[in-house]
Image (tube, helix red, strand yellow):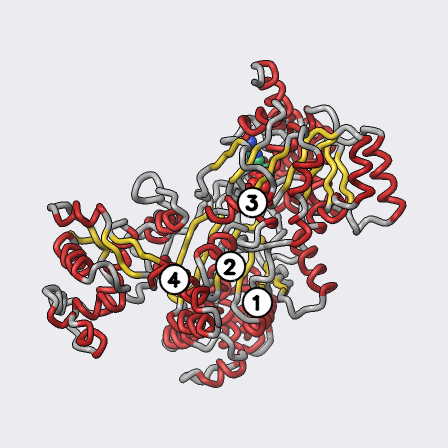
Amino acid sequence: MATKKVKEQTREILKDVFGYDTFREPQENVICTLLDGKDAFVLMPTGGGKSLCYQIPAIMREGTGIVVSPLISLMKDQVDALIRCGVRAAYYNSSLKAAAAKEVLDQFEAGELDLLYVAPERLLTKVFLKRLERIKIGLFAIDEAHCVSQWGHDFRPEYVRLGELREIMPNIPMIALTATADEHTREDIAERLGLKRAKRYVSSFDRPNIRYLVSEKRQPLTQVLTFLEDWKGSSGIIYCLSRKRVEDMAVNLQRHGVRAAAYHAGMPARQREKVQDDFLRDRVNVIVATIAFGMGVDKPNVRFVIHHDLPKSIESYYQETGRAGRDGMESEALMLYGSGDVNLVRRLIENVENPDQRRVEVHKLNSMVALSEALTCRRRVLLGYFGEEMKGTACGNCDICLDPPETYDGSNIARMAVECVKELSGDYGVGYVVDVLRGSKNVRICEKGHDKAKSHGTGVDINGDEWTSILRQLVHRGIFVQDISRRAALVATKKAELLLEGGSVTLAKYQPGIKRKLKRFTQGKDKKLYQKLVEMREKLAEDEDVAPYALLSDVALTEMSQLTDVSESALQNISGMGQHKLEAYGEIFLGTLKEHADVRGQAGGKDASGAPKLMAKGSPANDAQMHTWGLYKKGADATEIAAQLGTVEKSVYNHYIALVRAGYHIDVPAVIGEEFDEVMAELDDADPYASLTEVKRDLSVDLTNEFFRLILAWREAIGVA
Ligand code: ADP
Ligand code: ZN
């Protein structure tokens, strides 16, 4: 057992090296298990903090900790980040040139490394294993352990042999870590790695900092652009179903000034690598990708993930949305849900040849549809799917909880459904049950004799879509379960019996196609200062040739931007500011903070120009434009301004456009006049993939070019375009 003294030491390392005050569950226990020389199997969601579980014991134990990780591209970033914390770490994989590789191996043999990251195929070579015999090894950590299982989502053949390690070196503690939420895969991993008897640590798979949002898909491009307004300059991923959609979306975003790039398996490897690297280094903000993108993108500050198209299972959805917010900061997962997509995915599944596999995939898709159409807390449905019950009924951080649909006492209706399902002996799926309830006399029902059932037609007053929604809700509430092995047949549970005995259930009112408007995050930070800090970090990272997040996290920058007292001791309390980083970067950041505090002090907290700003963007206005702005503020109209400036009205309108873009408030609706609302409405409905010329041509109002551009500038400024 780890003594009190040892525990104290672990906490000291947590603070001094990594700059964190407290352990998260179950980090401390895992660390103690390894320090005791025992094995551990850690199941923790993405962003849970798995790395520290092996990094701290590797630092504390005698010898080097060997970390096996599948992704060569990630090793460098992980090692860079450790070195910046003052940890003696290195990596050994095929990307190293001979001389560099030799240097690493020399360090390793000389016992100068706390951590060595190794690619599995390197580790398992005869030569390397031989080498291991001579060197003191502190522990083995198998990261992304699901890669060993064919059941998992990312099987890697080179992982299979890792099971041998347990036999070759039975006395060195081993830890396997994964974020897989699926029970089947977990058992397989434990089996294959010889970790059946390892101490198991399972934490909740909830990701409370991710806000789940689902919107009906209407005009995807407009919806995406509107969403991006709130995340300007932040990193995010947009998933699309096909390469074609990926490319179209990327081009459209670039046209709208978003730093976006496409990524899919059809691109040359070199280009894909570049895109990924640009994303990690914050040179590109938004990646538009097929599901080929993501594995191994351990970028901690991905602020949003958008599903432009329906994922084909909840597993994929969870995994893809899980790439947001690893650093624990507020993040959003938006899914655009369109019934057309459901049919598309269904058709893809119909092509699957193996009938068993097809059935499983159909069920998975149906569960995904149910999540998208859920009228109860999304998080509850999501966690429930993985067999985890959420505490409380509402998470408070999904679209349903933030803007709850109306509810009613559905006990009687639910009893009707339970009676019907029981009468059908739990043998039929949602569609069939609905048909029976609605009194359908279709061939199948008559053949089975269910037109004579007592429940036949009891629910005729409620339409089919609404019944489907009710049955789905009853599944979410645990009144029915769906049996995958029998075509997702509905089966009544114990809860159903309780209901029949007089229990009650509240249902959400069925409202097809409701558009939700949500209050967005209000982050209590000084945006200007935050931006300065981001730029400073970028510059330093560029100088040192590392990813910005390996230098300091977004959490650290946010905390800095919120400091009221700017001092070195305050900096010490910033999350992630260990001793090493404080020495290396403390002064530089302190300088930026002080400078900003001084400027703000002089301006008396006001914006110096005094102009009412919508938002700061674009290039600042030039002299002529400022002249126009001065006259406009005094109440002059375009004709008067043109006369004063000795120019034509057209030029004045061009000034207006530049001013709006630069963030000055020109009352565009008033300038355009009565046609404004109509044009705005038509633009809302415009085909998102049409070119601007086409959009303008299709308007019912004949606008001048200047007016058209002015409206576009306005839309962008208020965040609807
Ligand atoms: P995982 O590998 O489980 O996805 P990481 O180990 O990358 O997660 O950790 C996710 C983030 O949480 C990182 O930014 C990490 O520095 C941070 N983190 C981990 N443990 C702690 C802790 N005890 N306190 C504060 N931040 C932590
Ligand atoms: Zn919720």
Q: In the rendered view, tell whether residue 234 sits above or below residue 173.
A: below
Q: Position of residue 643 (x, y in %)?
A: 55, 75
Q: Residue at x 23, y 55 (%)?
A: 508
In the foreground, 146 or 165: 165
Q: Residues within 10 Å of mark 4 (few under 14, many from 20)?
A: many
| Amino acid type, mark 1 | Leu
475 sits left or right of 230 in the view: left
In the foreground, 431 or 575: 431
The mark nearer the N terminus, 1 or 2, is: 2
Q: Which mark is residue 508?
A: none
**Real-space Cα separation, disc 4 to disc 2, in angstroms:** 33 Å
Q: Which mark is residue 253?
A: 1
Q: Are marks 2 and 3 in contact (CB under 8 Å)?
A: no
Q: Residue 583: which quarter of the image? A: top right
Q: Which mark is residue 228?
A: 2
Residue beneath disc 3: 189
Q: Nearer the viewer, mark 3 or mark 1?
A: 3
